[in-house]
Image (spheres, rainbow, N blue to C red):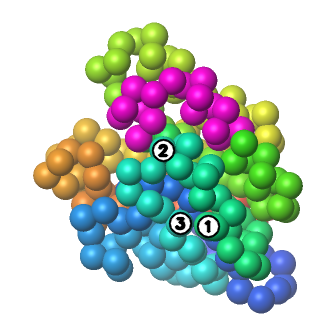
């Protein structure tokens, strides 16, 4: 845990952070107060940062869907920070990693053009499509983050994927304990990202 005094945000009105994602951020199967953005906002506040976390998760969304609704999700005024957590549905559907990369590239390009700083959360492909597909898919996220100079968190479901105790009955979506684990994992990275270090 980082000491609350370690990081400070520039003096300004309350900082806003958009979380652009799918069911993993929308809070599928969970009470509203257990959704990832709500829990992240509480975690950040507890760690000393007053940040409004905007839930722009849509269940079932692919990277193409996220790109299509990006301008709507940004709203006005445009938030200065965004976490992009898309790609899990591309992998579940076996969609082409090259198309996913093109969509993520376009999302980060448009965010950068609007002055939004980005943290890209990666995913790992389901292994049922074979090693070649998995290797191609898994490599996309870090490559896109590097290309755009974005902050990067390798696996959004780190410590949660595959653990029945941390997932709902479908084995895919995190339960409240799983969301808490996700927040504990990515939270320090988001905190440093928001503080610009």
Whole-percent x and y of residue 69?
60, 58
Whole-percent x and y of residue 29?
24, 64
10 displayed left or right of 127: right
Q: Are marks 3 and 1 in contact (CB under 8 Å)?
A: yes
User: Magenta span has 172?
Assistant: no
Q: Which residue is mark 3?
A: 56
| Label whose residue precedes the other's in the sequence (2 or 3) | 3
Q: What residue is at 44 percent from the left and 20 percent from the top?
A: 134
Q: Which residue is mark 1?
A: 73
Q: What residue occupies the far front of the structure in this picture?
A: 68
| Label whose residue precedes the other's in the sequence (1 or 2) | 2
Secondary element under disc 3, as helix, strand or loop, is strand
Q: What residue is at 72 percent from the left and 42 percent from the top?
A: 106
Magenta residues, as a range?
89-105
- Mark 2: few/some/many CA within 10 Å (<14, 14-19, 20+): many
Q: What residue occupies the far left of the structure in this picture?
A: 169
Q: Are marks 2 and 3 in contact (CB under 8 Å)?
A: no
Above/below status of 130 relative to 157: above
- Mark 1: few/some/many CA within 10 Å (<14, 14-19, 20+): some
Which one is in front, 65 or 87? 65
Q: What residue is at 26 percent from the left and 46 percent from the top?
A: 172
Q: What residue is at 77 percent from the left and 89 percent from the top?
A: 13
Q: Is residue 20 visible?
A: yes
Q: Quadrant of residue 100?
A: top right
Determine the CA span between mark 1 and mark 2. 14 Å
Secondary element under disc 2, as helix, strand or loop, is loop
Q: Which residue is mark 2?
A: 62
66 displayed left or right of 62: right
Above/below status of 162 relative to 191: above
């Amino acid at each position: 845990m980082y000491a609350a005094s370690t990081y400070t945000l520039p003096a300004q009105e309350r900082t806003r952070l958009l979380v652009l994602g799918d069911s993993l951020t929308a809070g599928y199967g969970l009470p509203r107060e257990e959704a990832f953005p709500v829990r992240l906002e509480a975690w950040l506040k507890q760690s000393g940062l007053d940040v409004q976390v905007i839930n722009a998760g849509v269940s079932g969304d692919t990277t193409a869907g996220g790109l299509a609704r990006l301008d709507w999700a940004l709203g006005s005024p445009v938030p200065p920070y965004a976490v992009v957590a898309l790609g899990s549905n591309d992998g579940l559907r076996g969609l082409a990693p090259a198309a996913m990369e093109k969509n993520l590239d376009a999302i980060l390009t448009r965010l950068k053009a609007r002055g939004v700083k980005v943290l890209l959360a990666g995913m790992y492909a389901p292994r049922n499509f074979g090693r070649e597909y998995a290797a191609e898919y898994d490599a996309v996220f870090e490559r896109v983050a590097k290309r755009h100079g974005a902050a990067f968190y390798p696996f959004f479901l780190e410590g949660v994927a595959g653990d029945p105790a941390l997932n709902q009955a479908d084995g895919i979506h995190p339960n409240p304990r799983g969301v808490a684990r996700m927040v504990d994992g990515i939270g320090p990275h988001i905190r440093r990202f928001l503080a610009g270090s």
